[in-house]
Structure formats: C-alpha cells, structure tokens
Image (spheres, rainbow, N blue to C red):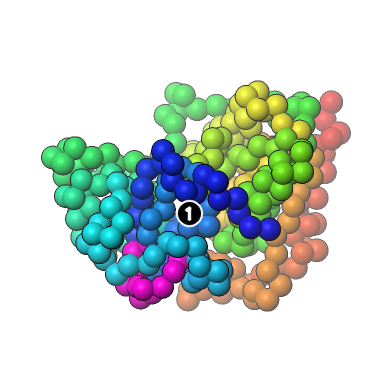
C-alpha cells in the first residue's frame, strides 16, 4: 500500500528542506526518510545530502521517484526550491546535533529560514543559534522538548476503560518500521471505513504532522506513562475512533531502548499488538561497532510481551 498524497502537495503548508547530509536512506536518517515518505505538516521540497546529490529522494528510498530532489548544499536548495524552513533530518545516537551540521544551520538562520529539530540537544539551548535567530527574526523549534514537570500527567488507568481497540505497533528492534507500519495501518483502517486515530510517540511522527502524540523518550520516567496515556485519552475524546493506533519505540528486549515499549504497553493497555520483525537482521540497531547485541526471535519477544500484558484484562 502506498502512502496517501493529498496533503503532500503543499497547499497551505510550509515549504521545508531536510538536512540529512551523509545519512539519507540510512537508519540514522530515519527522520528524513519518514518525512520524504509521508508529511502532513510540511511540504518537503528537497533533501540536502551531497553524497546522493542529483538523485530523486523517492528513488533512493523505495525505488520509485516522488519528485523530491536531493541537492548538495543549502545554497542550491534555496536557489532551486525556495524553502521557508530547514528540518534537521537525523536521529543520532544520543540525540546530539552533528558538529558538521552547525555551519549549515547558521547559514539557514542567516538566510531567514526557520529551523526545526527533533533531537535531545535543543536548538533553543544553544546560545549561538538563539542569538542568530533573534537577529534574523526566525523561529527555532524543538519538537522533542516535553512539557514542564508541573504540567505533566501521571498514570491514572484511563486507557483501559476506553470503548475502542488500542493497538500499539511494537517490534523486535529499533528502526524496524514501527512508525511506518502504524501510519499505514491507520490509513488502511480509515480507508476501509473503520475510524482510526494515530498517536505518535517520537519526533518523526510529530514532525510528519500527527495531531496527537508526545516525545516519549524525552519525558522523565515518572511521567512517561501518564503523559502518553493522557494523549491517548485526548485522542479518543476528540475523534471517537473505533481503533487507536500507537507508534512503538525500541523493543521490550532491547538492551538500550527498553523503556519506551514498557511505557507504551502500560499507557495504551493494548487490545492487540502488531509486531514488526526483520528476519535477516542479526544484531540490534544500536552502536554495532561497540555492542553487537543479538536479535531475539519472534517467540522470545512475544514471550516478554505476554509477560507484561498478561494481567491487563484481569484488573477489575
């Protein structure tokens, strides 16, 4: 199934160029990859990656051209595509801003472009970028920044009582297609006449234009479940769907990215789970040069998920 494109034509949307230099089409470039495939918030007018300049972004990702050019530099993007915003399109280990991106970010601000990032290292915490943005009248937007502690919600056991199906899309590893599958499932259900609402849990889903969602891995542990639970309830209250599809994060058996899955399970109180698996993948998507952690089997992952969900329907 192809992603829907009616909202990808850019009518009334902000024109954006994605900075993904050296990473487009790789797992580190998954934010750019996701936006090129699906965006309801920005009209994607190009990708900056000098290693693939001159090619079509859709052709690089999926073998099918989609009219989004890959260019070598921001200067070329400004001349040919006239963007209003630059999006940092990488998801680096640790969530830092790559040092080699700083010059391009400065150039974007100096040319009057808003800059958007979904990293743990916030643009608005960088004195140089803040000073430049103030001088040039542009916005710095950090989509991975959670709400303040005083405004954050704690677990209240509300999702389990919702009169709709709640389906988190989980997986055996990170960067394995959970968000993509969740979006496709949501669209397929709606096209089939089954009202469904997508709830994002990561920066890419939020950047793609999800109405509902939280940057889960940026939220302090005490509030992760409560914040996502509150968003799921909010999504139900506003849209009254028959199905709520929740984007997964990491894996319940992942050595580094375990917390997201556990929080998603408790926040959504699943009616069912859709599992993503890459049979040919041997080691986890995490610092393979340092930690070659083996992939689980589907049976092993399922056993863990059954363990953590076994009592959900028994609670009065």
Residue positioned 42% across, 48% down in the render: 43
- Left or right of residue 297, residue 104 in this image: left
Determine the residue located farthest toward the right in the rendered image: 314
Residue 56 is covered by the magenta coloring: yes
Q: Position of residue 15 (x, y in %)?
A: 36, 47
Determine the residue located farthest toward the left in the rendered image: 135
Residue 236 versus residue 91 in the image, above or below: above
For this rendering, which residue is in front, 214 or 68?
Answer: 68
Q: Position of residue 297 (x, y in %)?
A: 75, 68
Residue 296 versus residue 196 in the image, above or below: below
Residue positioned 53% across, 52% down in the render: 38
Residue positioned 43% across, 46% down in the render: 10
- Left or right of residue 161, residue 65 in this image: left
Visible in this render: residue 261? no
The kind of secondary structure element at disc 1 is helix
Q: Residues within 10 Å of mark 1 (few under 14, many from 20)?
A: many
Q: Mark 1 sits on what residue?
A: 35
Query: Where are the magenta residues, as a range?
Result: 47-57
Q: Position of residue 7 (x, y in %)?
A: 52, 44
């Amino acid at each position: 199934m192809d992603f829907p494109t009616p909202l990808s034509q850019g009518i009334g949307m902000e024109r954006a160029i994605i900075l993904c230099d050296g990473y487009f089409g790789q797992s580190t470039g998954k934010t750019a990859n996701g936006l090129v495939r699906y965006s309801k918030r920005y009209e994607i007018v190009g990708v900056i990656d000098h290693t693939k300049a001159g090619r079509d972004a859709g052709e690089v990702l999926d073998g099918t051209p989609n009219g989004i050019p890959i260019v070598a530099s921001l200067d070329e993007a400004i001349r040919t595509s006239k963007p209003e915003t630059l999006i940092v399109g990488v998801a680096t280990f640790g969530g830092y801003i790559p040092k080699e991106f700083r010059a391009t970010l400065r150039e974007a601000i100096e040319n009057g472009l808003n800059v958007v990032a979904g990293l743990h290292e916030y643009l608005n915490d960088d004195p140089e970028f803040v000073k430049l943005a103030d001088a040039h009248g542009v916005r710095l937007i950090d989509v991975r920044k959670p709400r303040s502690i005083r405004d954050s919600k704690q677990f209240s056991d509300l999702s389990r009582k919702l009169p709709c199906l709640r389906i988190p899309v989980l997986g055996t590893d990170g960067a394995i297609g959970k968000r993509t599958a969740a979006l496709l499932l949501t669209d397929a259900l709606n096209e089939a006449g089954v009202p469904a609402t997508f709830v994002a849990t990561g920066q890419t889903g939020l950047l793609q234009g999800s109405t509902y969602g939280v940057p889960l891995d940026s939220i302090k542990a005490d509030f992760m479940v409560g914040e996502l639970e509150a968003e799921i309830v909010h999504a139900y209250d506003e849209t009254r769907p028959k199905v709520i599809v929740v984007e997964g994060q990491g894996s319940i058996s992942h050595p580094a990215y375990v917390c997201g899955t556990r929080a998603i399970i408790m926040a959504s109180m699943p009616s069912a789970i859709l599992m993503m698996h890459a049979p040919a993948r041997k080691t986890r998507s995490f610092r393979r040069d340092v930690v070659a952690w083996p992939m689980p089997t589907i049976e092993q992952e399922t056993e863990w998920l059954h363990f953590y969900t076994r009592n959900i329907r028994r609670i009065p």
